[in-house]
Image: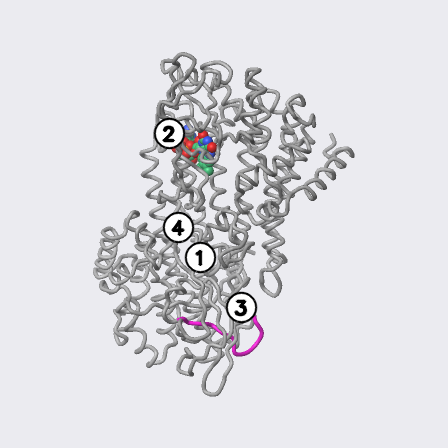
């Protein structure tokens, strides 16, 4: 047993760090540090820079533009990215539809879509959830009926993140209403400009527009856009969920937030000194850091047991990573709230959206509350914490 | 010991609740928020007409001589409906300073106008990067002839944008973290040298950043004894915190009730959320926190009657800590149990959650009051030693 990074890993980490320091445009870095939301243009620009370096899709096979890094290097890359801090890759493209096509797509789909997915020329969104089908995703009702070489789709999706900015959507539809509920589901890709698609905004409690309702009214989708086999969509959905979980501990994100909290606390008066020197404050941060360290080692253990990209049969312990990872992400946003105090309470929607200057408040504090509020979603979306617990109870504990 | 409301108190409770049921449901509230002030003058007048604005004032000042229980009733009802009008800054803070430290002339001039709804007040206390210590004041006031000249920078002045008269804390002596040397001034919010930047807060209430440059006030603007304002500030803020905790109870009660209702309706996996035992237990834990919160709020409010200011402060810190704990659990669990819908602006749960996080922060968050309490020697003192050997 040896829990240290190898010398090669350490050199790699230095390279990655240097790259993030030099290649990330200042305006984007400032937005990420200030917790502002990025525009589509920001994310595309940054992805282009990564792509030029060959690092836009590190986890993909080399033939499709991957790096060939082992799982430890991939972990280091992700962690350094989050701590830089630099924008995260668009998960829908890089971690979801890309790997899915690589695993199950046809040759034509791969050669047409994968390059455009990697550069975000096609920005994908995810059309899974429906108003009546959230945790119980397999009960979904959006219907697809084959008509010649097309599917005709009718129904409604909800919570479509960035649906209003997306070019394409991968969605789950019911193709066999008579089969057992998991059996009659298929996965399609649809061009968001297709007639019959209506996208309506949902404003969240941070005051931001990220989510949408997406309506399908007799939308005709070429049958060639079916992913894999008809009625196997549930297997692909499960593959995606398994694929994502190990990435969801996002230890680097929590570390970065705590580091920021510490730095900001140096300017906050407390007792005869500053908040950063307050023993109780330090203990609160240290306690979260202890848990982060444990989670980091657990993440590396799960990764070492076999990269999730080898197939859907990922380690069910990965559910712990999501469960605990999101709890610590939320705890870190809470610490930032404590540091910012009243300065976090001003609402400045334009600054959150990326305005260069705040309306009058403190730029370091203005996004802390909205990001704290929005962070409540990480224990709800992508398999809620309750769903993760159910998975662990059934699959790990055999209850 | 008696936990019951008197007949009059029950009538007050019914009347406030009925008024809010008729005029302040979630949709009505949304249109109030869209009014130019970000709250409703019409609604304010309704509160005046019902006598709510005069509740805590002595009869000799034209008020209704209500005590802490009456304030508790109103604040809890306001919390339940998420009322955004400036009751706390005008009646509890502004009114509190006038009641405690106002001269006869000041009281006679201002209190009747608070009661009839024509005067709004705000307390300009917090300063940049000061967190919550009430003594941490760098705003300065100096004597010039028979008058005073004030310079300083205040932030997060609740409803400071619409206030007519500000109560400004300023230092006339000492270093920026001395408890001695503070004074309170009544400042006309439109006086020369006062600039205000109003803004919306995360929970849709309002606040302002206020700069005072060479603001001149006459000697009759001083509240209480200049240089010795700290005990008064503490006392008024303590009783305001206690009242705010009662508001929190209303917010939590509503958040909890909504969550239970939703769990009875929402189905996943062919069953209501409420039928899942894991979620039942979570709802129970919320309920436990609600009842603890309700209980400590009663204790906090009644402790403000204590003649010993330190006992009062200790009780208020204890109350704020329990309320903070309860608010955190209830607010967060309410969102979690709602799933995606709770995250949306158009649905009430997220508004209750945001109000709770704001209340947890106002006048000192949980960590702050916990530290204060620990420093004061704990929540209660029996003065008794336990002898075992
Ligand atoms: C910010 C955000 C972004 C999202 N982005 C997308 C997206 O891009 N694409 C997409 O398709 N979806 C997206 N979602 C949807 C997300 O996946 C769903 O919100 C999630 O699946 C939960 O479903 P629900 O909201 O309907 O809650 P419900 O399923 O109604 O759950 C409500 C509560 O009950 C709990 N619960 C449910 N069943 C059980 C059970 N059996 N045992 C114990 N507890 C249970 C849940 O954990 C939750 O706490 C997003 C959601 C959010 C909040």
The answer to whether residue B261 shows anywhere in this view is yes
Disc 4 target residue: B292
**The quadrant where residue B8 appears:** bottom left
Q: Horizontal and vertical percent for residue A129?
A: 42, 29
Do the dots labelled 2 and 4 sit on one chain?
no
Q: Closer to the camera, B26 or A362? A: A362
Q: Closer to the camera, A245 or B255? A: A245
Do the dots labelled 4 and 1 sit on one chain?
yes
Q: Are marks 4 and 1 in contact (CB under 8 Å)?
A: no
**Left or right position of A291 against B305:** right
Circle 2 SS class: strand
Q: Given the image, what chain letter belongs to the residue carrying mark 4?
A: B
N-terminal label among 3 and 1:
3
Q: Are marks 2 and 3 in contact (CB under 8 Å)?
A: no
Q: Horizontal and vertical percent for residue A379?
A: 48, 37
In three-dimensional space, the C-alpha distance between marks 2 and 3, rounded to whole angstroms, equals: 55 Å
Circle 4 SS class: helix
The residue carrying pointer 1 sits among few (fewer than 14), some (14 to 19) or many (20 or more) residues within 10 Å by Cα, namely many
Q: Given the image, what chain letter belongs to the residue carrying mark 1?
A: B
Label of residue B320 in the image: 1
The residue carrying pointer 4 sits among few (fewer than 14), some (14 to 19) or many (20 or more) residues within 10 Å by Cα, namely some
N-terminal label among 4 and 1:
4
In three-dimensional space, the C-alpha distance between marks 1 and 2, rounded to whole angstroms, equals: 46 Å
In three-dimensional space, the C-alpha distance between marks 2 and 4, rounded to whole angstroms, equals: 45 Å
Do the dots labelled 1 and 2 sit on one chain?
no
User: Is residue B171 rendered magenta in the image?
Assistant: yes
Disc 2 target residue: A215
Tag nearer the camera, 3 or 1: 3
Which residues lie in the magenta part? Answer: B166-176
Label of residue B136 in the image: 3
The residue carrying pointer 3 sits among few (fewer than 14), some (14 to 19) or many (20 or more) residues within 10 Å by Cα, namely many
């Amino acid at each position: 047993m040896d829990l240290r990074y190898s010398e090669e890993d350490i050199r790699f980490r230095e390279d990655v760090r240097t790259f993030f320091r030099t290649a990330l445009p200042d305006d984007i870095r400032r937005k990420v540090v200030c917790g502002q939301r990025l525009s589509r243009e920001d994310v595309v620009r940054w992805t282009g820079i990564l792509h030029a370096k060959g690092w836009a899709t590190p986890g993909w096979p080399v033939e499709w533009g991957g790096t060939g890094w082992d799982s430890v290097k991939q972990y280091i890359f992700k962690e350094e990215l989050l701590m830089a801090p630099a924008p995260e890759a668009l998960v829908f493209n890089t971690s979801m539809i890309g790997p899915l096509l690589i695993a199950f797509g046809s040759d034509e789909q791969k050669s047409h879509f994968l390059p455009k997915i990697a550069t975000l020329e096609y920005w994908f969104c995810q059309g899974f959830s429906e108003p009546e089908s959230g945790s119980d995703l397999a009960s979904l009702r959006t219907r697809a009926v084959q008509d010649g070489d097309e599917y005709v789709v009718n129904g409604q999706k909800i919570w479509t993140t960035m649906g209003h900015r997306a070019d394409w959507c991968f969605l789950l539809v019911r193709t066999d209403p008579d089969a057992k509920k998991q059996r009659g589901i298929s996965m399609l890709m649809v061009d968001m400009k297709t007639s019959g698609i209506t996208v309506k905004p949902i404003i969240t409690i941070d005051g931001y527009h990220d989510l949408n309702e997406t309506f399908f009214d007799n939308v005709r989708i070429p049958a060639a856009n079916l992913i894999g086999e008809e009625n196997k969509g549930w297997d692909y959905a499960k593959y995606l969920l398994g694929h994502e979980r190990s990435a969801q501990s996002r230890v680097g994100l929590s570390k970065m937030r705590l580091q920021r909290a510490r730095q900001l606390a140096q300017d906050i008066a407390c007792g005869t000194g500053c908040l950063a020197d307050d023993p109780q404050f330090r203990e609160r941060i240290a306690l979260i850091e202890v848990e982060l360290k444990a989670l980091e080692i657990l993440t590396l253990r799960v990764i070492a047991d076999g990269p999730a990209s080898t197939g859907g049969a990922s380690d069910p312990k990965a559910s712990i990573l999501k469960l605990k990872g999101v709890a610590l992400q939320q705890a870190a946003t809470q610490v930032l709230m404590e540091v910012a105090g009243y300065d976090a309470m001003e609402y400045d929607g334009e600054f959150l959206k990326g305005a260069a200057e705040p309306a009058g408040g403190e730029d370091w504090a203005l996004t802390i509350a909205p990001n704290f509020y929005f962070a409540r979603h990480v224990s709800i979306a992508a398999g809620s914490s309750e769903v993760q617990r159910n998975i662990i109870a059934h699959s790990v504990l055999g209850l | 010991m008696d936990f019951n409301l008197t007949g009059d108190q029950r009538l007050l409770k019914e009347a406030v609740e009925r008024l809010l049921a008729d005029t302040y449901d979630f949709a009505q509230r949304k249109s109030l928020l869209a009014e130019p002030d970000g709250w409703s003058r019409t609604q304010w007048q309704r509160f005046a007409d019902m006598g709510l604005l005069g509740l805590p004032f002595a009869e000799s000042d034209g008020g209704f001589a209500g005590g802490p229980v009456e304030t508790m009733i109103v604040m809890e009802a306001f919390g339940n409906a998420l009322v955004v009008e400036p009751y706390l800054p005008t009646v509890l803070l502004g009114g509190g300073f006038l009641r405690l430290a106002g001269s006869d002339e000041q009281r006679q001039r201002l209190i009747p106008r608070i009661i009839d709804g024509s005067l709004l007040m705000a307390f300009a206390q917090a300063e940049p990067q000061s967190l919550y210590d009430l003594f941490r004041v760098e705003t300065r006031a100096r004597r010039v002839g028979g008058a005073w000249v004030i310079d300083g920078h205040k932030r997060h002045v609740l409803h400071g944008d619409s206030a007519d008269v500000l109560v400004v804390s300023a230092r006339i002596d000492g270093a920026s973290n001395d408890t001695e040397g503070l004074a309170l001034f009544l400042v006309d919010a439109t006086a020369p040298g006062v600039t205000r930047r109003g803004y919306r807060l995360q929970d849709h209430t309002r606040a302002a950043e206020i700069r005072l440059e060479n603001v001149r006030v006459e000697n009759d603007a001083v509240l209480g004894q200049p240089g010795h304002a700290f005990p008064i500030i503490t006392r008024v803020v303590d009783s305001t915190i206690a009242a705010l905790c009662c508001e929190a109870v209303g917010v939590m009660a509503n958040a909890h009730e909504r969550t239970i209702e939703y769990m009875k309706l929402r189905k996943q996996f062919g069953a209501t959320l409420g039928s899942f035992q894991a979620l039942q237990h979570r709802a129970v834990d919320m309920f436990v926190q609600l009842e603890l919160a309700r209980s400590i709020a009663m204790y906090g409010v009644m402790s403000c009657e204590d003649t010993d200011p330190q006992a009062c402060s200790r009780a208020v810190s204890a109350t704020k800590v329990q309320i903070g704990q309860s608010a955190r659990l209830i607010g967060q669990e309410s969102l979690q149990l709602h799933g995606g819908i709770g995250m949306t602006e158009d649905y009430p749960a997220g508004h209750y959650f945001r109000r709770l996080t704001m209340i947890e922060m106002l006048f000192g968050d949980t960590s702050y009051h916990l530290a204060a309490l620990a420093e004061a020697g704990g929540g209660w003192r029996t003065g008794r030693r336990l002898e075992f050997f």
